[in-house]
Amino acid sequence: MKTKKISEDNGKKIYETENETQLIQVFKDDLIIKNGNKISVPNKGAINNAISSYLFRILDSYHIPNHFLKQLSNREMLVRKLHMIPISVFVHNIAAGRLVKFFAIHEGKELDCPIIEYHLKGGEKEDTMVNEDHIISFGHASSEELKEIHRLSSKVNAILKEIVRRRGFRLVNLKLEYGRRDTQILLGDEISADTCSLWDLQGNSKFDSRMASKSVDQIADEYQSIKKRFFMES
Ligand code: ADP
């Protein structure tokens, strides 16, 4: 079914298929940790594919248009081909990471309302935070499309917050990517342990796999425990 590989990054390989409207995402085990080193975390790809497939199906039932078609295998997901908008949309619920660094708020502070941020995807360079004017002026999306992206991101965040809360997690922040199919905006990419930042509801234990101080085994265990909780396995 896979024909030509069209991209490969740390998270996934993307292949064209015999059907020109569909792509296959292959989830990888590679992970870049905070010191910049690349490691391979056994089973990470399969776990992210399982969680993403599960969440896309749920979002579908809440009428969030998305690219998911089918989970093909452990690591492979069949999706609708989109014309991607080169923006990462971050939704923050709790102050952590960059928010703490740039705005001098206490880590762990519950934000009065979710903050939606746009970051221009920069290839090899670090992503740059931009506002709506940059995105419109650079021709990446129209004002109507951005309104739709904002509306969908708020809704996805509210749905996911509740789903992860029932599994004992706080949704600290999440990253979303969108694309166009004809004139419709659809949610693409993945929603997984790599794109959601989760903390334990009890206490403040952080599932931060990118911490350089952790061993590969510890990181692999962390992904496994997130998966167990997601699928309520004992
Ligand atoms: P990153 O998302 O950090 O760029 P990935 O390894 O996850 O790295 O790469 C996946 C690539 O595939 C991204 O460039 C993403 O925008 C793109 N992509 C995701 N979903 C689709 C889709 N449905 N159609 C086309 N491209 C997609």
Image (cartoon, grey):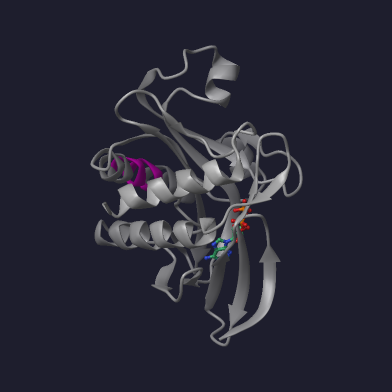
- Whether residue 7 is visible to the viewer of this picture, yes or no, is yes
Ligand number 1: quarter of image: bottom right
Tally of marks: 0
Query: Is 76 colored magenta in this rendering?
Result: no
> Looking at the image, is 128 positioned above or below residue 4?
above
> Looking at the image, is 232 positioned above or below residue 77?
above
Where does the image place residue 163, in percent across and percent down from the top left? 27, 45
Tell me the residue at 51%/68% (across/down).
75
Magenta stretch secondary structure, dominant = helix
Where does the image place residue 116, in percent across and percent down from the top left? 46, 34
Q: Nearer the viewer, residue 174 or 224?
A: 224
Q: Nearer the viewer, residue 24 or 36?
A: 36
Residue 65 left/right relative to 168: right
> Looking at the image, is 103 positioned above or below residue 15?
above
> Looking at the image, is 196 positioned above or below residue 71?
above
Tell me the residue at 58%/59% (across/down).
84
Query: Is 156 colored magenta in this rendering?
Result: yes
Where does the image place residue 22, in percent across and percent down from the top left? 52, 77
Tell me the residue at 59%/38% (across/down).
210
Q: In which image quadrant can residue 51 be found?
A: bottom left
For the magenta stretch, what is the residue range?
152-158
Where does the image place residue 34, in percent across and percent down from the top left? 66, 35
- Whether residue 146 is visible to the viewer of this picture, yes or no, is no
Residue 61 left/right relative to 71: left
Tell me the residue at 34%/51% (across/down).
228
